[in-house]
Amino acid sequence: MYSKIALSVGGSDSGGGAGIQADLRTFMALNVHGCSVITCITAQNSLVVNCVEAVEKDTLISQIDTLFSDFNINALKTGMLLNERIIYNTASKLKSYSIPKVIDPVMVTRNGSKLLEDSAISAYKKFLLPIADIVTPNIFEANLLSNCEIKNKEDIELSAKNIIELGAKAVLIKGGGLKDMQGKDFYLDVTGKRKWFINKFINTKNTHGSGCTLSSAICSYQALGFDLIESIKRAKVFIERSLEKSYKIGSGPGPLGHYQSP
């Protein structure tokens, strides 16, 4: 049942809705065995992030080396990397592995809260984007990566072009940060292939971890052997179902419901 293995490299969400926790729930729901490399530990709930602590360099590298020394990992994704040191060390280790790499640039939440140090933005561009098979930014993250101020559909397409020019093989910009683009994501790759993925908009406030879930679902389907476009199509359907099953557990936005048949 779990013959394929996916790896998530990212931060731990103590509230269980996003980060490594959301990734592992997604992997399991899609019949993929999930491994994890913790980059940072957070103290958070549905309302606030009270503390973020980065792991040391040796701990980070040891996690990666230990996993790859034993497991045949079929695909990987990155999430919250926090600072320039973690980004550099992660990229340096992962670039040698010829497996699909989904880079989710966890920089800014949908409400505009920053999730990384300022110097990390240039490190993403220099070290991570050139090894990415696909980058999956939200509107605010695409702004930072492409130096665009996205206000409409045309801006999204221009931002995607700029991100491809930074070295990524493909990009999927999530449109949910714009009211009239909810449920619509734009894909562009180095061959010039472009596609708008349009799915039903699920009207719920319980969206915590939706970006993590999308990127880990793409990673899961890549691990299972599907090509990138088909992986995105299936991941979008999985997100739609997970949002339909989302639930509230605290005073703020709740997590997605991953417990479903793929």
Image (tube, rainbow, N blue to C red):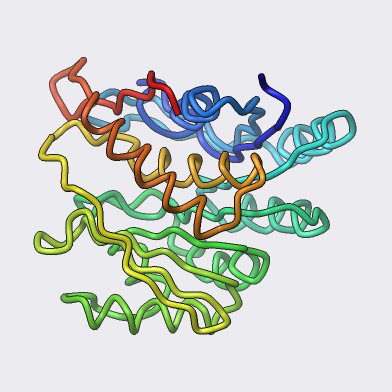
User: From where the camera sits, is residue 80 visible?
Assistant: no
Above-or-below relation of 205 to 120:
above
Q: Nearer the viewer, residue 202 or 104?
A: 202
Image quadrant in which the N terminus is located: top right
Above-or-below relation of 60 to 2:
below
Q: What residue is shown at x 15% (from left), y 62% (from top)?
A: 178
Q: Is residue 85 left or right of residue 164?
A: right
Q: Nearer the viewer, residue 207 or 90?
A: 207
Above-or-below relation of 199 to 181:
above
Above-or-below relation of 52 to 146:
above
Picture coordinates of residue 172 (x, y %)? 42, 64
Q: Is residue 262 left or right of residue 83?
A: left
Image quadrant where residue 183 sits: bottom left
Q: What residue is shown at x 89% (from left), y 34% (from top)?
A: 69
Picture coordinates of residue 53 (x, y %)? 51, 34
Picture coordinates of residue 227 (x, y %)? 60, 56
Image quadrant in which the C terminus is located: top left
